[in-house]
Structures are given as C-alpha cells and as structure tokens.
Image (spheres, grey):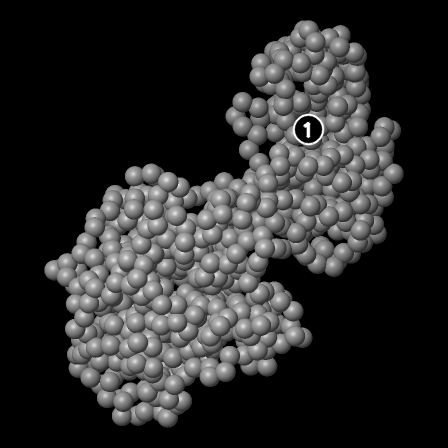
Amino acid sequence: MRRNLLLLAASLVGCIILLSAHNVDATPPTADPLHPIGVAYIGDDGIERIPLPPWPSGDGQTVNGLYVPLGPEALQRVPEILLAPADNFCPGADIIGLAIGQIAAGPTDVTNFSISDAAPNLSGCMWGPITGSSSGYRSAWYELTAPITGMLVMQAVPNASFSNDYDTVIAAYSEGVCGNLQSNLLTCNDNYNGFLSRISLQVQEGEKYYFEIVDRDLAASDAKILNLEVWIETRTNWRTDSAWNTTAAQRSRHMTATVGDYIYVAGGQEAVDNYIPPGGVRPFLRTARLSRFHVPTQTWVELAPMPPECAPLSNDGGGGYSNTGMAYISGKLYIPSGFVGNNDIYLGQHCVYDIATNHWSVNAADAPWPGGSDKALGYSSVIADPAGDLYYVVNGITGPFFGIDTVTTASKDIFLYAADFDFWLSSAAGQLPPANTARYAQTGALIPGPTGDSELCVVGGLEPGSTLISPAALLPGGECFNTAIKSWRPIASLNFPRYLAGSAVGFDGTWYVFGGIDESFMAVEEIEAYDALNNRWLVLDYPFNINDPGRAWTQGGVVGSTLTVIGGETQPLDLSGTGGSLVTAEVLQTNIPLYKTQTAPSTVFLPVVSIPIDVGPEEPNDTFETAWPLSLNASFDSNFYDQADRFDVYSFSLQQSQRIEIDLQQIPEGDNFNLFLYTVGRTLLASSQNPNTADESITIVLQPGTYYLMIVAEANTIPNVPSWYWLDINAY
C-alpha cells in the first residue's frame, strides 16, 4: 500500500497540470431576471439552477437557510373536505385540491355523462366477459397534483340507495395529453366492494395524475351517482424509541462516520441561534462532544470530547467544530476544518481522533487551504476512501452562508489527504482536476461507479447568488470524480432538489440522500437513491419519508440493512417567538429496501405499483371475483359482519336448464336486505326488493351456465354487530 501511495504521489506531483491556482468563483454569479425565483433553468454551462427567493420576513424568518414559520403550522389537518363534482371529459378534469391529512369526498350525478371516442381501452381492467364498450360509459374525470409523496387511495362508496350505485371501473394515469393516455395507465380496478371500485397508487409530491371513473353498463334506469372518497395514506417504516433519543443525539450540523456496527457522532450544535428551551437557559451553540451509537443495540457511549487546541472555545461558550464533515480511515477519525463561532471564518486546524486510545491530536498536516488555515472552506463534503487510506474534501465556501453584507465565495476545489504519509494533494496546487461546478452545502459519498471504478460524488447544494435579487441558487444536479482516471462527470438531478441534506451508502453500494431544505426553505421529506448504472435518482416509497417533522442537516449511516438517522434541525409547529430552529434528539431507524441498482440497465428500482386489496378472511365474498360457490338444494345462514359490509356475493352453476327458487329470510328487525341475480357478464336477470324485513324471493328458469347472486344491505342498523340472514336455493 505504501509503495502504491508513493507512486500515486510521484505521478500526481511530477505531472502537475497547470490548472487555476485557486479554484473559486471570484465574482458570484448574479441572478438573471429572465429566470424567475423558484423556477429551474439550464444555464449556458449546462448546469441546472433554481434561484432562491430573498430571505423571508414578516411571518417567519430564515435561520442559516432554514425557513421557520412563526405561529401555528400553515397546513391544518382537516378530517374531510367536499370533493367537487367530476367533469365528463379529461380536458376539463376537475382538480382535487387535497391537502396533507385530508379526505376529499363528494357525489357527482353522472346519469347524463357520455364517453369520449378517444377514451382509453380498459378491457385489461374489467373482470369477466365484456358485453359492451371496452372503454366503458359515462366517464368522470379528476386531476390531482400530489401534495405529498404517499399512497393515494380512491374508492367509490355506496349511495344511500343501491339503485343509484353503478358498476364502476377506476383508472389512474400519469401526466400526459388528454386523448392519448393509454400508454400512461398506472393502475385500475373493477370490483372492490360489490360493483364499486378502489385503487391504491403511490404518488410523488409535485407530480400530476389523471383519474377516470367509468360505468360498465350502458343502461341507466335510475339516476347514477358517483360517490367518491380520496385520501393519501402516510404510514411510516421508521422506528424510534425514547431510550435512543438522549442528549448525545441532540445536535445539528454535526459529523458522522460509520465504523463496523458503530456510528460516531462528533461536534455540531446543540442549539441554533437564539432558541431557548422552555424554562431553560441558553445552551452552548457548538458542542465538542464525541459520542458513539451502537446500531444493533441502540445504545450510546460518550468518548473524549474535542479539546480546545483542536477547536477552540468561542464567546458562545461552546467548543468543537460544526458545519463540516468527518472521515474514518485506518482506525482514526479525521476532521479537516469547521465552524468555530464566526460566520465569516472556518478554521482549518486538522483534528484527528484515535479510536484505539480514545485520544485527540492536532499533529496531522493541515490542508493546503488557498487562504491559509484561518480561511478554510466550510460546508464542504468530507469523503473517505478506506481502501486507499485516503480521504477527500470537496467544494465549500468562504464567507457567510448567505452573503448579505459580505460576499460568499464557493469553491470548485478538491483536496486529497494520504493518511500513511501525512500529505495533501489539491486542485488549488494543480495536482487534481477541480470540480466543474462551485457549490456548498451539498452532500457527498464514495460509491461504485457504472464502470466499476470508485467514484467520489456530490449532489445538490447551493451556488452563491446576487445579494439583492437572490441569496443563492439551488443546484439540483451533481457530479462524480472517478478516483482511478481522475476525471469528473455530471450526474442526474435529484427529483427533490435540496441543500444541507445527509446521505449514506448501503451495503450494496446504493447511495441514499435524505433530509435537507428545498427552494422554498422547507424541509424535504423524501429519500432518494442513486442508480449509478442508469444515472437516475429514484424516490423511495412514501413510508420511508422523514416527516412529522422533516429535518435539515440530519446525518446517519448504514449498518447491515439498517439506515440510522441522527439529529438535525426541524421546523416546529410553534416557536412561541423564540426565533430559532429546534434541534432534535430523535434517532430514527429503518430497514433499507433490498434493491440493488447496479445490476442491469433494465432494472427498475421502485416502480409505481398498485397495492392488492385484501378484503379480509372474515368477509371474502364482497365481489364477483370473491363470490362464495353455492350448492343447489341447500339452506344455510350467513351475515353482514358490520355496517360497513354492504354486499355478499354467491355463485352457482347449472349443467342443464332448470327452474331456480331463491329465498332470503329471517332479516333482522330494523334491517332491509334485497336480492339480485346476474349473469357472468353482470346482466341483471331478476331482483327482489321488498321493504324492511320482508322476505325476498326470486323464481326463474335458467339455461346452463354460471350465475351470481348478490345480497345488498340497504339498511343495516346495528353497528359493530353481525346481521344474520337465512338463504335457501333450490333447483327443479
């Protein structure tokens, strides 16, 4: 290894490429008035940017880039809102204004609706023989832009009278051109409860979807009323425990490094700006603490704190570094620089912790910062390459986070530290090629690249902007440095652009990015995974969202298949005028998806899928598909198990023409059950709809074939109690 490092150093130093002596943007780019705030655009250099708005004022404030609304949360949870009537055609689809935590419900009279000649073919969604149009009849359309990533549920629910129900099919489409949505079909359902339909679909925040509800039958003897409910489920795969959430975890802008089954957590801030806990005193802003979290047992151990000679005390009373990163190589933790209490200066004192001796030192060589050790870069990515006993420092800034009174300067520099020889190489000295884009507050990791070489990658972050028009521009994309051939390549943009995010690499090399802040100064909840082979970012299923609340500058690591996320700062429901971000002590864990994105170009990582509907073991006969088979010349009792159970469906078959008598008896007092007989194609052959508890009876001569008997509970008066009935079926 030492021989290889000497050769590496000799080749890099001996063959210096005369690049710029200091790879920073001397003059920050000015926001172009042709590019509106918050709207992404591609610059002449091919880089995608989103100009950020000015600092908010009046109803909230920005704390180091995290916008914190004052007072109650803007989005209140409302149990149910009225769903406006649907439109007959896709071009005029009614917009579902669904907010987080809401259920939208309402009726639409579709009796006089028609179907477009360009309506999609839904034959693949329809159960049984299709006797009419494969596109259905009486189409009703809705449009939704998802307010959150989650599992959307849309279902047709029974009307007060079964005569107003109809045989629905619900289909969902991704955004496209109305009249040409066939290839955009995502999922569909014919029967879920009786003839009523239900779909479940993972939707992605900000994406647009179309929903079509059609009638399978042309005839309409009574008014046809579509009674629809829509909501987005927000269950979570994350787990936590109060025993994990100690003061060791309560920090933000901290550093983490994963070593075996442990995650080391160093430095950071235990509070942000002037936030004071209720009834408490102002805590230290920075902390010098070093803590170790054992992932399998979820236990903490306190280790030797960073000494003052490593990161000096400041007038806030705190010590240690924040707003930086940490690398683990060769049994030691390395921190190259950090914030020490002055918004304009980042100290470049190289701090090293020896795990075996539990001891800190400052004996390692400082990085060759172009401005000297008191002008180091902050908000950089610090990324370890354990196989080479190396680590890298990439990008960062000098100056304040958002330059208002002074200039913020971002860097393209990359630095390489060889631990075995205690020396540095850098792009500032012309020994490495600088990054293509100057950025800061990005996240980074070392991952297996598409060619098999290790790649040092960064994504997201900010580019300094005009101090008057926009404080910075958000960078959705990223770039990767091939450590073997020493070259950079651009990578795809995040689906949810962010800065001050955390990231970790899974056991299979998958790079996960979590947390962070978006272009509206709000915390990002979605987790994304990078598919290096296909150069794309894939959004994990909604249960992996970090929400309630979302958080910025959270850090973590992967041990085995467990992703652990520690600390960060959150957006509270009510700051009570304290004027700062809350720093969380919550530790979250989840099992990351067992998908390997590096296998083949055709690999689909997390497809949009519909979730199969499970009607439950106690009630398997709510639809034609789940009908209970009946034996002829038999009697038996059954029930509707509660008020939500409205349909029981049975099937029977005839080998020859026979007269069939069906009797429904012993209907409970206060209930009203009716009887309907259908062909396999769902044509109604006969019905018995007597009032109240009167017996129901059908007598009919049938030809050979399969038939379906549906019992409908028009009234079921006693909640949570089964309503029993007696059914006879005889053939002559």
Q: Horizontally, is 339 left or right of 653 in the view?
A: left
Q: Residue at x 67, y 22 (%)?
A: 646
Q: Which residue is mark 1?
A: 194
In the depicted structure, whether residue 558 falls above or below residue 709? below
The C terminus - image quarter: top right
Rendered image quadrant of residue 514:
bottom left
Q: Is residue 583 visible?
A: yes
Residue 188 on image: x %, y %? 66, 44
Rendered image quadrant of residue 338:
bottom left
In the depicted structure, whether residue 654 falls above or below residue 460? above
Residue 213 on image: x %, y %? 74, 42
Specify few, some or many for label 1: CA neighbours under 10 Å numbering under 14, 14-19, or 20 or more: many
Residue 393 on image: x %, y %? 33, 73
The N terminus - image quarter: bottom left
> What's the amino acid at mark 1?
Gly
Q: Horizontally, is 724 left or right of 278 in the view?
A: right
Q: Residue at x 80, y 45 (%)?
A: 87
Q: Is residue 489 visible?
A: no
Residue 582 on image: x %, y %? 42, 49
**Which is nearer the eye, 128 or 315?**
315
Q: Horizontally, is 660 left or right of 22 in the view?
A: right
SS for tag 1? loop
Q: Residue at x 37, y 55 (%)?
A: 252
In the depicted structure, whether residue 82 falls above or below residue 632? below
Count every numbered label the image shows and give the total: 1
Q: Residue at x 79, y 19 (%)?
A: 687
Rendered image quadrant of residue 720:
top right
